[in-house]
């Protein structure tokens, strides 16, 4: 916006400067020409009184020399217009003769250097008015002057081209300098106006990004033009509303979670009275874990700090360790139900940019679905594949499978027909997408469902999103060959 405003001001100012400077430059040129010819007219006028008194060559040469500033003046007197005392005597002695015998007809007199053409001089003498004509190196002014004898003499004044353009270059340079100064000034003014409009808009954009990143304290100073001030007021009001809504949701989540304490207390007391045995110990451990999870939910919901994703910035865990730990927990229940379990790829550390608690929640959701939606004795497996830029966690079973994987992924937004809320798969999807990965549901080599969790290590965005929020991404060749290899259960 800033540079656009500068360009507009430069264009407008340039058009205004051109519209005024070009006509003004032409007017200055005409004024310089008029000044030069006015000086020439004054020089020609200085000779006119002498021509009206005498046509003597010597006298006229002295007058021309004193009137002209240089050798640029000439006087052209026609034939028969000179002084003639002998002619008068001839008239007296000859009676009614024409005086031809006394002195003959007088010749034309030309004083000074002639530059104009004879036809131009003749035309001026015939028309009786001043005229100008172009000659090599400049122009000439031809001024007719009436003599005492009634004839017309022509005074020629030479006007060099340098005199016509004298001072014109300086005037044009001044005009050009003024035009450039106006353009530069308009750029400076437009830049200041642009900064005044752009800076509030940039602050608004930055605050919007901060709010989107979870910095709920981001606010916009109410500065700048009226429209931007109104936008800042609306943004700040929206941010306050978002903070209030989140606070209300946290309080509601904490209150709802706190209501679970009473049934948990009863359940813990009942579990304590079960006595000894593997089933009793497993029940008490599950109750204790459930109570810890409820406490964690309450503390997190009460926390006023916004929870934002921090992929790859001080957050991460060992996926192999988490898988071993959760499989140790679920293996006891699997043994009671006669399920065969296999774990692969957890013999060495596998670091992923995911919080430990989030990975635990995702694995528990998937393994819980295996126990909830497959019959007792159904085998399942967990595989971890570590690549250069991604880690893949596969949870597969030998159950009946999922007929409509897309519908299963969509149930994260509501309850399914089988009573499932779909929150488990939604937890898994959000975990994968927080790293730029995705989740896919397909058929496993065991014959049932295979849930593939793609965890991106470099934090890149997914290439292309599929239907209903599922993400499809091209797999590295190193990992593709490991997906479909046969798996056997012990």
Image: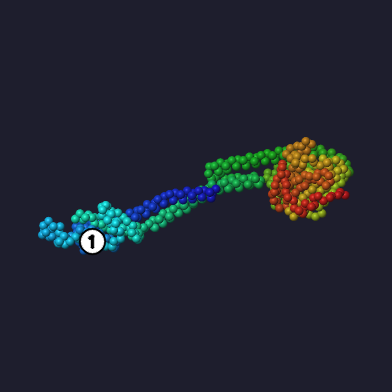
Query: Is 336 placed above or below 94 here?
Result: above
**Tally of numbered tags:** 1
Quarter of the rendering containing residue 116:
bottom left
55 or 72: nearer the viewer: 55
User: Residue visible at 41% across and 54% down?
Assistant: 175
386 relative position to 91: left or right: right
- Residue tagged by mark 1? 109
Identify the residue at image location x=71%, y=38%.
252
Identity of the residue drawn at 76% across and 43% down: 425
Q: Which of these two is toward me, 255 or 405?
A: 405
- Secondary structure of residue under mark 1: strand
Q: Nearest the camera: 249 or 68?
A: 68
Q: Does any portion of residue 189 appear in the rendered image?
A: no
The answer to whether residue 452 is left or right of residue 8 is: right
Neighbour class for label 1 at 10 Å: few (<14), some, many (≥20)? Answer: some
Q: Residue at x 82, y 43 (%)?
A: 448
For the residue pair 406 and 69, the one nearer the viewer reads as: 69
Q: Position of residue 300 (x, y in %)?
A: 72, 44
Q: Is residue 225 left or right of residue 247?
A: left
Q: How is the image coloured?
A: rainbow
- Where residue 15 appears, as percent x and y from the top left, is 46, 49
Q: Is residue 366 visible?
A: yes
């Amino acid at each position: 916006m800033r540079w656009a405003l500068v360009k507009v001001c430069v264009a407008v100012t340039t058009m205004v400067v051109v519209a005024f400077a070009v006509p003004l430059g032409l007017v200055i040129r005409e004024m310089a020409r008029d000044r030069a010819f006015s000086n020439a007219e004054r020089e020609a006028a200085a000779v006119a009184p002498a021509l009206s008194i005498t046509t003597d060559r010597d006298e006229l040469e002295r007058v021309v020399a004193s009137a002209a500033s240089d050798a640029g003046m000439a006087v052209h007197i026609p034939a028969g217009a000179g002084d003639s005392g002998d002619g008068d005597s001839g008239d007296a002695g000859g009676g009614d003769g024409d005086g031809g015998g006394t002195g003959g007809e007088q010749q034309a007199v030309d004083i000074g250097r002639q530059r104009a053409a004879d036809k131009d001089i003749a035309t001026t003498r015939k028309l009786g008015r001043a005229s100008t004509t172009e000659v090599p190196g400049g122009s000439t002014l031809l001024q007719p002057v009436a003599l005492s004898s009634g004839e017309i003499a022509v005074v020629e004044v030479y006007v060099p081209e340098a005199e016509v353009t004298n001072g014109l270059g300086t005037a044009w340079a001044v005009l050009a300098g003024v035009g450039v100064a106006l353009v530069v000034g308009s750029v400076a003014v437009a830049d200041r106006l642009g900064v005044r409009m752009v800076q509030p808009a940039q602050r608004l954009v930055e605050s919007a990004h901060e709010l989107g990143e979870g910095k709920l304290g981001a606010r916009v100073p109410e500065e700048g033009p009226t429209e931007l001030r109104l936008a800042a007021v609306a943004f700040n009001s929206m941010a306050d509303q978002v903070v209030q809504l989140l606070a209300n949701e946290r309080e509601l989540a904490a209150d709802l979670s706190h209501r679970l304490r009473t049934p948990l207390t009863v359940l813990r007391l009942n579990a304590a009275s079960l006595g000894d045995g593997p089933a009793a110990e497993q029940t008490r451990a599950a109750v204790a874990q459930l109570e810890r999870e409820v406490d964690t939910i309450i503390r997190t919901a009460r926390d006023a700090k916004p929870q934002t994703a921090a992929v790859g910035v001080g957050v991460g865990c060992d996926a192999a360790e988490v898988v071993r730990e959760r499989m140790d927990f679920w293996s006891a229940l699997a043994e009671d139900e006669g399920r065969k379990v296999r774990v692969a790829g957890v013999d060495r550390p596998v670091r992923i940019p995911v919080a430990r608690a989030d990975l635990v929640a995702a694995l528990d959701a998937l393994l819980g679905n295996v126990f909830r939606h497959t019959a007792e004795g159904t085998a399942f497996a967990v595989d971890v594949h570590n690549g250069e830029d991604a880690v893949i966690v596969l949870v597969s079973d030998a159950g009946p499978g999922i007929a409509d994987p897309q519908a299963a992924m969509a149930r994260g937004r509501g309850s399914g027909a089988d009573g499932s809320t779909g929150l488990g798969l939604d937890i898994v999807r959000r975990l994968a997408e927080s790293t730029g990965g995705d989740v896919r549901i397909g058929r496993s080599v065991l014959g049932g469902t295979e849930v593939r969790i793609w965890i991106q290590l470099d934090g890149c965005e997914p290439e292309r999103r599929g239907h209903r929020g599922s993400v499809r991404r091209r797999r590295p060749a190193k990992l593709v060959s490991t997906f479909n290899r046969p798996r056997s259960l012990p």
